[in-house]
């Protein structure tokens, strides 16, 4: 029995129209961890990145972001444009992802659920691939002349990290 799943519904840009200047995808996310159902209207493009990061890294309650974040105000790139930090508000739904014994321990509100790495990867990749397909089917993103280099670099770093993390294990569920 699958004790973890995650999906997104009502996927849209903030204005609900295909906006080439909107870079953050929103939607209604539904995650199942054991017997817990977690639903939240969030920035699902940030959720996808956090899920990808969690494939190789623990995500604890002390990390400064939520797995289902309300906002993703800024993409803050590293100097090499290989990684991004997404800055948002303090609102959202959250759980921990701790790597143990060939899988992950998912901890939500005191409940703990062990999930094999194969099951976890399958769910993460299915969610992320759904988000990427939405981006790919939308108008290409553009940057206005008024936007600064920081914004452009952040968006580039977001996709550089996404592609690297998604391709690290290409043989799994593609």
Image (tube, grey):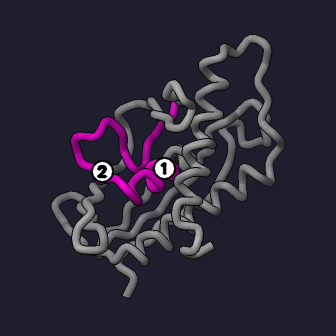
Image quadrant containing the C terminus: bottom right
Q: Which residue is mark 2?
A: 59
- Whether residue 124 appears in magenta in the rendering, the answer is no
Local packing at callout 1 (Cα closer than 10 Å; few below 14, some 14-19, many 20+) is many
Mark 1 against mark 2, which lies toward the viewer?
2
Residue appearing at x 38%, y 61% in the figure: 38
Q: Which residues are magenta?
A: 48-74
Q: Secondary structure at mark 1?
A: helix
Q: Residue at x 41, y 60 (%)?
A: 55
Residue 167 spot, x, y in % from top left: 59, 59
* Picture disc at residue 126: none
Residue 50 coordinates in the image, percent (x, y): 44, 49
Image position of 50 with respect to 128: above or below: above
Q: Residue at x 59, y 29 (%)?
A: 154
Q: Secondary structure at mark 2?
A: loop
Residue 76 visible in the current orientation: no
The N terminus, quarter of image: bottom left
Q: Which numbered disc flags the more N-terminal residue, 1 or 2?
A: 1
* Residue 57 is one of the magenta-drawn residues: yes
Q: Which residue is mark 1?
A: 47
The single residue placed furthest to the left in the displayed view is: 110
Q: Nearer the viewer, residue 112 or 55?
A: 55
Residue 174's place in the image compared with 53, above or below, is below
Q: Is residue 111 left or right of residue 64?
A: left
In which quarter of the view is residue 130 placed? bottom right
Residue under the image location 21 percent in, 58 percent down: 109
């Amino acid at each position: 029995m699958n004790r973890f799943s995650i999906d997104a519904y009502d996927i849209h840009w903030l204005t609900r129209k295909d906006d080439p200047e909107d870079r953050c995808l929103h939607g209604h996310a539904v995650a199942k961890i054991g017997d817990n159902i977690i639903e939240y209207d969030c920035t699902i493009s940030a959720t996808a990145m956090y899920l990808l990061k969690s494939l190789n890294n623990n995500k604890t309650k002390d990390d400064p972001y939520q797995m289902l974040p309300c906002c993703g105000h800024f993409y803050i790139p590293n100097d090499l444009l290989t990684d991004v930090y997404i800055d948002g508000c303090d609102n959202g739904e959250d759980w921990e992802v701790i790597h143990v014994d060939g899988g992950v321990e998912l901890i939500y509100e005191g409940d703990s659920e062990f999930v094999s790495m194969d099951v976890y990867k399958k769910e993460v990749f299915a969610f992320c691939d759904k988000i990427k397909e939405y981006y790919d089917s939308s108008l290409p993103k553009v940057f206005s002349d008024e936007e600064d280099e920081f914004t452009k670099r952040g968006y580039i770093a977001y996709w550089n990290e996404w592609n690297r993390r998604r391709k690290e294990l290409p043989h799994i569920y593609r």
